[in-house]
C-alpha cells in the first residue's frame, strides 16, 4: 500500500531431496519462507518442527511476535512437533 513498493531481498535455497525454498526479507524485519516440493508433486512431510501433508507452506516470522504464522496450500493439516 502506498506510492513506493516495499523493500525486500529474496534468496532461493534448494532444500533436502525434493524440497525447495524461497526466503523473503522485508524492510520491517519480517521474514517469509515459502517452502514447497518440486512441481508441488508430493507432500512436504517435515519442515523443521512442522509436519504437514501440504505441498506448499508460507511461514512468516515477525520480530517480537509470539510465534510464526503458518499458511498451507493443499493438504489437510499442519502440526508443530
Image: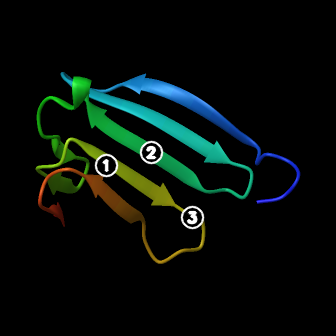
Within 10 Å of disc 2 (Cα), the crowding (few <14, some 14-19, many 20+) is some
Kindly check if marks 2 and 1 are in contact, taking CB atoms under 8 A apart as contact. Answer: yes
Disc ID at residue 33: 2
**For marks 3 and 2 on the same chain, the one whose residue lies earlier in the sequence:** 2
Q: Position of residue 74 (x, y in %)?
A: 19, 50
Q: Measure the C-alpha gap from mark 3 to mark 1.
A: 16 Å
Disc ID at residue 57: 1
Q: Is residue 46 left or right of residue 1?
A: left
Q: Position of residue 63 (x, y in %)?
A: 60, 65
Within 10 Å of disc 3 (Cα), the crowding (few <14, some 14-19, many 20+) is some
Q: Is residue 59 left or right of residue 49?
A: right
**For marks 2 and 1 on the same chain, the one whose residue lies earlier in the sequence:** 2
**For marks 3 and 1 on the same chain, the one whose residue lies earlier in the sequence:** 1
Q: Is residue 80 visible?
A: no
| Residue marked by disc 3 | 62
**Residue at 48% across / 25% down in the picture?**
12
Amino acid at each position: 500500500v502506498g506510492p513506493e513498493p516495499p523493500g525486500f531481498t529474496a534468496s532461493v535455497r534448494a532444500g533436502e531431496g525434493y524440497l525447495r525454498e524461497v526466503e523473503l526479507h522485508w524492510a520491517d524485519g519480517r521474514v517469509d519462507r515459502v517452502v514447497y516440493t518440486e512441481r508441488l508433486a508430493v507432500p512436504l512431510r517435515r519442515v523443521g518442527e512442522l509436519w504437514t501433508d501440504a505441498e506448499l507452506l508460507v511461514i512468516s516470522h515477525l520480530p517480537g511476535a509470539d510465534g510464526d504464522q503458518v499458511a498451507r496450500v493443499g493438504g489437510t493439516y499442519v502440526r508443530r512437533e
